[in-house]
Image: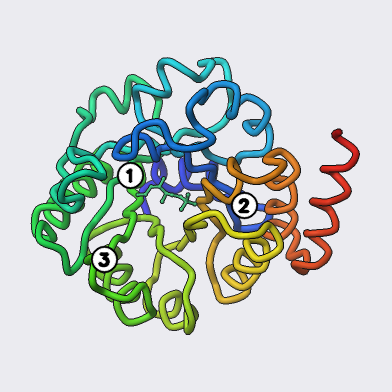
Amino acid sequence: MDWGIQNRLSRMIKPKSGRIVMLAVDHGYFQGPTTGLQDLKSTLDPLLPYADTLMITRGMLRNCVDPNIDVPIMLRVSGGNSVLTELSNEDLTCDMEDAIRLNACGITLSIFVGAEYEHQTLVNLGKLADWGNKHGVPVMAVTAVGRDMARDARFLGLASRMAAEIGAHIVKTYYCEDFKKITAATPVPIVIAGGKKIPEKDALRMAANAVADGAAGVDMGRNIFQSGDPVAMIQAVRSVVHENSPPDKAYQMYQDLSASQK
Ligand code: R5P
């Protein structure tokens, strides 16, 4: 692999553990003011010291994040539709020169496999991979599947493998039953999204199962920033991802940190 791509990957996926806790706060690109992110700066500031990478759009990066941080940026460069319309009709919404200007460590887009605009999102992944390979910037593909398709190992596995085939350097997908089949068939690092907010203990268990089944870590949003105590939660997630803490121990850590921070 190209030195620049490998070096940027190793700034995000920590070489010591081979794992990553990426914090996703890009939800507003199609959802607007998502619960917990209305005042993005206030939510982010206390979480940043615990994030290995921050997934964000260029607008929020420029307006809400201090450029003096040392957290690598995974820049979302796709969009084009809101929750009110056909989500799969995504295109590239950020010029690659701007990604460089923002010192992005990685760039990311969604692919919608089995959805109406599957073709254009997959072709856009190819374009980003070409650009990323030329300039040494890794590309992360976020796998979405068609509205009526189950988020299971068959369809998420299909989307994840296709993403790697087309050139993604990292794949973001969802945890599901038989997740090992997805990691076994996808020869690039996989991170899981957290999905909708669930109880902290369950989210920690999901993260633990994902890394045990071969994920390189998480790219988690709502289960951190919508948690009862986001700063305690991201630390508990870190202990699962980087130290293989069992979920019960991590949940105890969450409770202890939460109590001590009150
Ligand atoms: C989805 O397309 C966006 O990248 C989201 O920001 C991300 O997948 C959501 O993360 P979570 O499901 O953990 O809130």
Front tag of 1 and 2: 1
| Measured Cα–Cα span from mark 1 to mark 2 | 21 Å
Q: Secondary structure at mark 2?
A: loop
Q: Give the labeled residue for mark 2.
A: 15
Up-down: is 7 above or below 93? below
What residue lies at 75% left-to-right and 59% top-to-bottom?
Answer: 243
What residue lies at 68% left-to-right and 28% top-to-bottom?
Answer: 46
Front tag of 3 and 2: 3
Q: Give the amino acid at mark 3.
A: Val
Q: Secondary structure at mark 3?
A: strand
Other residues around mark 1 within 10 Å, as few (<14) / some (14–19) / many (≥20):
many
Mark sitting earlier along the chain (3/1): 1
- The C terminus - image quarter: top right
Other residues around mark 2 within 10 Å, as few (<14) / some (14–19) / many (≥20):
few
| Measured Cα–Cα span from mark 3 to mark 2 | 31 Å
Mark sitting earlier along the chain (1/2): 2
Using residue 127 as the reference point, say whether residue 41 is left or right of it.
right
Other residues around mark 3 within 10 Å, as few (<14) / some (14–19) / many (≥20):
many
- Ligand 1 closer than 8 Å to the CB at disc 3? no
Up-down: is 13 above or below 65? below
Q: Give the labeled residue for mark 1.
A: 108
Q: Give the amino acid at mark 2.
A: Pro
Using residue 123 as the reference point, say whether residue 208 is left or right of it.
right
Find residue 210 and report its image quarter.
Answer: bottom right
| Measured Cα–Cα span from mark 3 to mark 1 | 16 Å
Q: Give the labeled residue for mark 3.
A: 145
Q: Secondary structure at mark 1?
A: strand
Up-down: is 234 above or below 242? above
Percent x, y of residue 54:
50, 37
Q: Give the amino acid at mark 1.
A: Thr
- Ligand 1 closer than 8 Å to the CB at disc 1? yes
